[in-house]
Image (tube, helix red, strand yellow):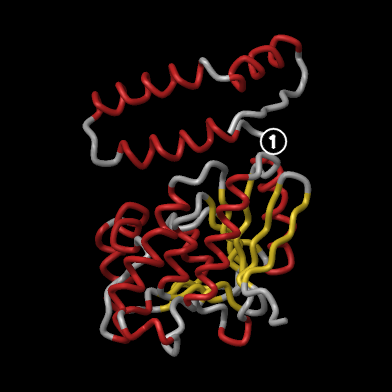
Amino acid sequence: MSEALVQIATAGAVRTLTLNRPAALNSFTAAMHAELRAALEAAAADAAVRCVVLTGAGRGFCAGQDLNDPEMSDVEAVVDTLYKPLALSLRSYPVPVIAMVNGVAAGAGANLALNCDFVIAARSAAFIQAFSKIGLVPDCGGTWLLPRIVGRARAIGLAMTGDKLPAEEAERIGMIWRCVDDAALGETTMALAHKLAALPARALAQTRQLIDAAMPMDYAAALGQEARVQGEMSRAGDFAEGVAAFLAKRAPVFKDR
């Protein structure tokens, strides 16, 4: 049997999904998309999973789309039926998702990382909006994500030039959460993953949703949205548990998803 294109490992409440085409820098094929989608759906359906880590095997995180994949005969269909659902899934995921960027993240691979809630990158890693080099435009949410994360000027500069952005610079401009020494990448990522796994997953997912939804809103509308969702959260079990634990001076045990 051929080796899995997405390797799955679980440690406590943390599920790690590893893109596994190292010889091709984990570039996407339709088959790898299918395995990643299935793995994400399985983790989302598993109540024991409270944080997901996404990474790549070998020396790269993900080099984007494999241009040799037969599916590339219809680029629009690839973007619309494969990358769009992947991006939407990550932005509405029921638990936090961390991209552990161990090497180059290029094209759709760079934007795949940016769709995650946290990006922790090795110091040797780099991000490349490589689309312009082959006559294309950013996909996998890049045109929406980049200007909101780094501002219009930097978004246009990164997207049009296709220049390599070192991880350290990506952290400096606020594009990623953290850049760490290569040797500390795994330990740092898993420490954050287990920290998030112990927090109220439903509240974290709603926090992401509120922040994204508030971007085009005026202030009053955002405040109203906060009140509505806060009311929903206050009627959930995690709020009762959090208050009880606070009053009892003990660690809370959150269960909602």
**With 172 as the anchor, is 21 left or right in this view?**
right
Q: Is residue 116 above or below residue 164?
A: above
Q: Residue furthest left?
A: 218
Q: Is residue 231 above or below residue 174?
A: above
Residue type beneath disc 1: Ala
Secondary structure beneath dot 1 equals: loop
**With 235 as the anchor, is 190 left or right in this view?**
right
Q: Quadrant of the N terminus?
A: bottom right
Q: Quadrant of residue 152?
A: bottom left
Q: Residue furthest bottom?
A: 68
Q: Residue at x 47, y 71 (%)?
A: 109
Residue 6 or residue 172, whichever sits in front: 6
Q: Residue furthest top?
A: 247
**With 76 as the anchor, is 170 left or right in this view?**
right
Residue 49 or residue 123, whichever sits in front: 49
Question: What residue sits right under mark 1 in the picture?
Answer: 198
Q: Residue furthest front?
A: 1
Q: Residue at x 67, y 58 (%)?
A: 16
Q: Is residue 176 above or below residue 247?
A: below
Residue 247: x and y, percent? 70, 9
Q: Residue at x 67, y 48 (%)?
A: 193
Q: Residue at x 25, y 62 (%)?
A: 153
Residue 237: x and y, percent? 61, 19
Q: Quadrant of the C terminus?
A: top right
Mark 1 neighbour class, 10 Å CA radius: few under 14, some 14 to 19, many 20 or more: some
Residue 8 or residue 206, whichever sits in front: 8
